[in-house]
Image (spheres, helix red, strand yellow):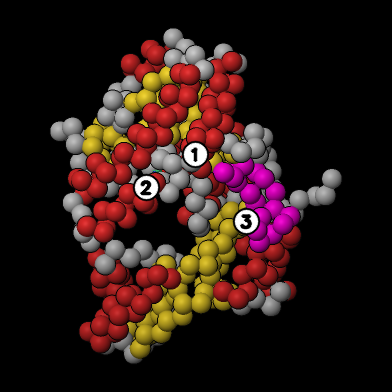
Amino acid sequence: MRIVQKFGGTSVASIERIRKTADIIQSELNQGKQVAVVVSAMSGETNRLTAMARELSATPAVRELDALVATGEQVSAALLAMELQSRGIAAYSYSGGQAGFVTDGDHVRARIKSVESAHLLVHMQAGEVPVVTGFQGVDEHGNVTTLGRGGSDTSAVALAIAVEADVCDIYTDVDGIYTTDPRMVPKASKIDRISYEEMLEFASLGAKVLQTRSVELAMRFEMPLHLRSSFDLVQGTMVVGEDETMERAAISGVAFNRDEAKITIMEIPDQPGIAANVFGPVAEAGINVDVIVQNVSEQGFTDITFTVPRSDYLPTMEIMRVLCKQMQARDVKGDDTVAKVSVIGVGMRSHAGVAKAMFDVLAVEGVNIQMITTSEIKITVVLEEKYIELAVRALHTAFGLDRQEA
Ligand code: ASP
Ligand code: MG
């Protein structure tokens, strides 16, 4: 059995935590497994380094920013390798470049082009442990690059694929994915197995356990992920292909996001090109539009409503006011107290009536639905933020997700 173990910032946050992490690695080696390790920077370190750069300049050169933040992972990799060596384990730290991670030259958000890691595999087969810095690589000219915040997850998955590992273990401070946020619904339960697609839907709704790109990469190469805690060594959540998840209920979980705002542009002349005109400037401003609804047009006019992250609400309203004048729409209205609630599940493909069941539950609770959007495995509603807890709890119960007391 060959595994890649990824340890996040909290698992290498202190000398004590590094020792605990070494225990985990050692116990896998003792079971005869071949092991490679990928580490994040000690928690808080990437922020600390970035803040120093910002003190010098509001716009530090991205090449130097990458050279700077890449050091965070080098510290934790070297410390962990030292600790493993002191236990008689042949462990060696590798920077991204040394481990064979080649990326494009797009600093701060580089993409991995290839992982030339045959040399690491030879070490693993000899019972040695490469300890690789996550989050980084080098471009074709040898410049240090980084993969975007949370990028160590993607490094770990890419390495697991390159060395043909059986599984990629991702250790964090939570012990898996839950049917909803346990802080909101104490009866939320841990999901044993979830599909890559469901995981992506949860992630897009703010369940920031994994960098999205890492899940996309794992899905493409069918690399099983095991999300688990380094604080509590229980079985976590397996992220696997859809056909490997068990036959189960229509819904796997209820996700929500409070960070939403809604904007409506009213009575805009309905002609080819209006959507492009409305969303072009928003995209140019780097703002992500999510749910979009366009109404039927009446007498040549229509309303378009869409949501953006709440932090982009004011700049988007600005853009829309200008557009409103230019395009001779009647008015622009906005509301930054909305939230999004989604039910997610690959089971929806084979269970009819999930949408109706969801709307019934919300109707009984007296929750007004403002917008609806669906995908094959997700139904999302936009509602007033003050109803979010009521809606999430009611849906969690109605879809049979509440943990049964033993
Ligand atoms: N240290 C980097 C960050 O904080 C990468 C990672 O931890 O995945 O974003
Ligand atoms: Mg992380």
Q: Amino acid at mark 3?
A: Asp
Dot 2 and dot 1 residues touching (CB under 8 Å)? no
Check disc 1 and report the residue beneath it: 14
Q: Is residue 123 visible?
A: yes
- At horizontal 36% and vertical 51% (from top left) the residue drawn is 48
Residue bounds of the magenta highlight: 173-191
Label 2 or label 1, whichever comes before in sequence order: 1
Marks 3 and 2, how far apart in space? Answer: 26 Å
Q: Residues within 10 Å of mark 2 (few under 14, many from 20)?
A: some
Q: Is residue 18 left or right of residue 142?
A: right
- Residue 104 visible within the image: no
Judged by depth in the image, the label closer to the viewer, 3 or 1, is: 1
Residue 354 figure quarter: bottom right
- In the picture of the structure, the residue carrying the numbered disc 3 is 181
Quarter of the image containing the C terminus? top right
Tell me the quarter of the image containing the N terminus.
top right
Horizontal arrangement in the rendering, residue 127 relative to residue 231 (left or right): left
Residue 176 covered by magenta stretch: yes
Callout 1 crowding tier (Cα within 10 Å): few <14, some 14–19, many ≥20: some
Residue 28, percent from left and from top? 57, 21
Q: Considering only order in the chain, which callout, 1 or 3, is on the residue closer to the N terminus?
A: 1
CA–CA distance between discs 2 and 1? 15 Å
Percent x, y of residue 295: 43, 77
Q: Say which residue appears at 65% left-offset and 44% top-offset.
A: 191
Circle 2 is placed at which residue position? 46
Q: Nearer the viewer, mark 3 or mark 2?
A: 2
Residue 199 position (above or below residue 23): below
Q: Secondary structure at mark 3?
A: loop
